[in-house]
Image (tube, rainbow, N blue to C red):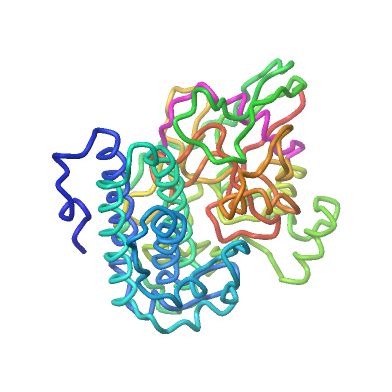
Amino acid sequence: MRGPNHLVNVSRMSDRRLEILRAFENTREGSCALAAPLTQEDQTVQSMTDASPTKWHLAHTTWFFETFLLKPFDDSYAPFNGAFEHLFNSYYNAIGEQYPRASRGMITRPGVAETLDFRAYVDKAVAKLLKNVSDNRFTEVFQLMRIGINHEQQHQELLCTDIKHALSFNPLALAAYDAPAPAADNGVPKLGWIAHEGGLEETGIDWELAEFAFDNEGPRHKSYIDPFNIADRLITNGEYLAFMADGGYETASLWLADGWALVNQEGWRAPLYSEESKKGWTSFTLHGREPLNPNAPVTHISYFEAAAFAEWAGKRLPREEEWELAVRDLPLEGNFLRPGISPAPAPVNGSAAPLRQVFGDCWEWTQSPYTAYPGYRAPKGAVGEYNGKFMSGQMVLRGGSCATPEGHIRPTYRNFFYPHQRWQFTGIRLAEDA
């Protein structure tokens, strides 16, 4: 699909308009690159309620720009298809009713080709809007563009994890993407600990300094943090296998009550996608099924499993304020999403940095519930439904994963999932009281 740079005379655009246009087109092209290797059937299937079809991700992210940008700011804009407002609305009650989430896989039409036409139509209109919008309205357009871009980056990660879940049901062990180059594997260093004195610390985003952040990352506020130690790397598959071999999934005292009930109800005995055979443990990946690397970070585990492992290890999971304090001065470097290459957590590479595998690889469960920071108020209007209304019953994760687009993550970034969910690239970093 042709990028929107073919649609406007960029030489006549201001630097700021050109900057956001380039970011927009790169993001839009990135989503299409993730979908391109998949068959049309791959892109339509929905394997569970929590997941969405690839085609739906492509359409919904387009709906977002049409709904929040084009309709309010371009009086001449004619929607591609008026029925799409209902079909691809995820959860915005202020916009109107939504098509049932559990039935998204039943949306056989529009097909993939028409969905791509929808994307091209909206991309052209967005490029035109960026060229023509008045200066006094551009700041608001710019802010909404950044929200839309970051929103689509979130869906790029979901696209990867959702198609992985769908393909995992196929006994052919299909590969969606090329395998990554073998990562440096120098063995697993002994788990070390980084000490922090704690104290009265400020956490959360500083709006005066932030280039961009989601509303749930602020406001900046003070928290009293007791002295603590945090592990210098993620927990590995090998260490998690030791927990399993020691009866981790059969020992009720290690588990929170809801987790223990779920283990017995679902028959969990290993992380999602892990299977034992006569030749040893294997794991399904987006490049097919392969032997489980004992030195790579354990992933695809629920909060309940992470908490049970921590209990077994005599430790605990970090609180989100502790995690943020520990990593806030580290460079935003890590193992992130590369379109066309299967996202996969990599072994710790022997880096001399005191705290390793912080960004990328695996989202790290914290023991903090997802709630509002002191002074938080959801933005007005439908955009205010983006984060605030989900602050109930979920747990905070930090750090990003191998399926997170590079540049999307920050030390203050708060992801959140329900404690039973494990189809995301979720892992473990331990902490302890000092």
Q: Is residue 413 above or below residue 285?
A: above
Quarter of the picture holding the N terminus:
bottom left
Q: Specify whether 59 is left or right of 301.
A: left
- Residue 358 percent across, percent down from the top left: 51, 34
Quadrant of the image for the C terminus?
Answer: top right
Q: What residue is rendered at 75% in x and 54% in y?
A: 393
Q: Is 407 located above or below residue 249 in the figure?
A: above
Q: Which residues are magenta?
A: 313-334
The residue located at (41%, 68%) in the rendering is 59
Residue 220 percent coordinates (x, y): 64, 26
Q: Position of residue 396 (x, y in %)?
A: 66, 44
Task: Please determine whether, in this image, residue 234 is positioned above or below residue 424.
Answer: above
User: Which of 58 and 20 lies nearest the eye of the viewer?
Assistant: 20
Residue at image position (29%, 57%) is 340
Count numbered badges in the picture: 0
Examine the image and state in which quarter residue 336 appears.
Answer: top left
Q: Is residue 409 in sight in this rendering?
A: yes
Q: Is residue 354 visible?
A: no
Q: As drawn, is 427 to the left or to the right of 200? A: left
Magenta segment includes 104: no
Residue 182 at x, y percent in the picture: 33, 48
Residue closest to the eye, 50 or 84: 84
Question: Residue 199 vs residue 352: left or right?
Answer: right
Q: Is residue 330 magenta?
A: yes
At 37% from the left edge and 69% from the top edge, which residue is drawn? 79
Give 158 or 211, whichever is nearer the viewer. 211
